[in-house]
Amino acid sequence: MSTVTIIGTGNIGAAVAGIAAKAGAQLQILAREGEKAETVATPLGAASGTIGDELTGDIVVLALPYDAISQVLTAYGDAFDGRTVVDVTNPVDFATFDGLVVPADSSATRIIQEALSGASVVKAFNVNFGATLATGTAGPLPTTVLVAGDSTQAKDAVIALVTAGGLRGVDAGSLKRARELEALGFLQISLAAAEKTPWTGGFALIG
Amino acid sequence: MSTVTIIGTGNIGAAVAGIAAKAGAQLQILAREGEKAETVATPLGAASGTIGDELTGDIVVLALPYDAISQVLTAYGDAFDGRTVVDVTNPVDFATFDGLVVPADSSATRIIQEALSGASVVKAFNVNFGATLATGTAGPLPTTVLVAGDSTQAKDAVIALVTAGGLRGVDAGSLKRARELEALGFLQISLAAAEKTPWTGGFALIG
């Protein structure tokens, strides 16, 4: 049985908690200050706590906005070593809504991987709107979770979790592909903001 | 009635010719040396010729691989002035299959627009596999053509053509969004090459 820690109790954190619970994973939910982990954790029978508690998951999902990531990296540092760390962020520049805050030739995932050299960082869930993760469908198609990273073992663990949780998990390539996944995430958000696709929809990958 | 010139007789050129014919556009098909424009043009009753012939379309679709674009820009130069020029390219680095050949903070469309200051350049059709343009469906969903550029008039002309041709046309934003469209095009090609989605499929936008 996999062990999963989810840091963050927002839209995506709650949806990924639901997938992990359905997969039968042993779950730990850690809230940020001011959040209530129980709102996500209680119905799933998961352990709940706050950032700073000891990590119990072999897979740790950073279900946080990009600007909240650095404080978690500071809080845990080497405690991430040996774990699979899942980055779900879309580092959109919300001041301009016209690009990303990470360098054009890099990605949030690359930056997190460079900060956590002892962990295996993968990108996942960033091109899935929360509702498509919760329902398992994106319009008429099954929800596909695209996973990118340099560790095949880490990607396989996330894909196995997603599959056991009832969704389709797909290996989208190396860590370099996180850049394209973040471009796709940003494009999808901008299309939803412009009412060209519903917030319950977005892009679906044909299987 | 719109007038459309399509330069290139490959997969995408033929599919866009079909859309334009269905839309009732007056069509001109220009082949590259060694191609036969008639193979596309004859069934549609379009005018056919070769690169170097006078352009008749208000909309000119560059249905060519990225590395063939520069010779067309050289061949026509100022003849593009005042026209809507449609860039369909995915400038993938096929030597490495691990990135694009355009700078990370730019796009093929940006480079073409800078070369053609008197034309309005838009990105379109690059995230649609040929089969989805020909059939009008991407899996269970209608095919959506995403259009990006800085001229609203040019985008509206392309969206009107696509709509009259039976597909869904969507304004994907300014010319800067061509970067995200090229990232999406590359990601989609890499997923198809890895057999994660069929070459008749790819990503579909939920409406």
Image (spheres, coloured by chain):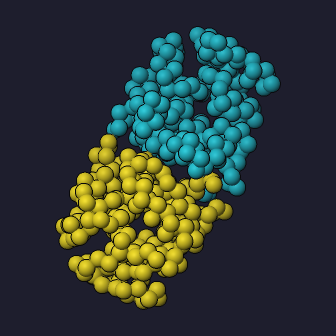
Chain colours: A yellow, B cyan
Of the pair B182 and B21, the residue shown nearer to us: B182
**In the rendered image, the vertical position of residue B33 relative to residue A164, given as above or below:** above
Horizontal side, residue B34 vs residue A81: left or right? right
Name the residue rendered at 35%, 33% in the picture.
B103
| Quarter residue A35 falls in | bottom left
Residue A76 seen:
yes
Q: Residue at x 80, y 24 (%)?
A: B43
Q: Is residue A49 above or below residue A124?
A: below
Count of number-bearing discs: 0
At 31% from the left edge and 52% from the top edge, which residue is drawn?
Answer: A110
Q: Quadrant of the C terminus of chain B?
A: bottom right
Q: Locate residue A8, reporting x and y percent.
A: 34, 74
- Name the quadrant containing residue A32: bottom left
In this rendering, would B41 be left or right of A86? right
Provide residue A113's location: percent of width, then percent of height: 29, 56
From the viewer's perspective, tell me whether residue A22 is left or right of residue A67. Answer: right
**Residue A172 coordinates in the image, percent (x, y):** 48, 51
Q: Nearer the viewer, residue A165 or A182?
A: A165
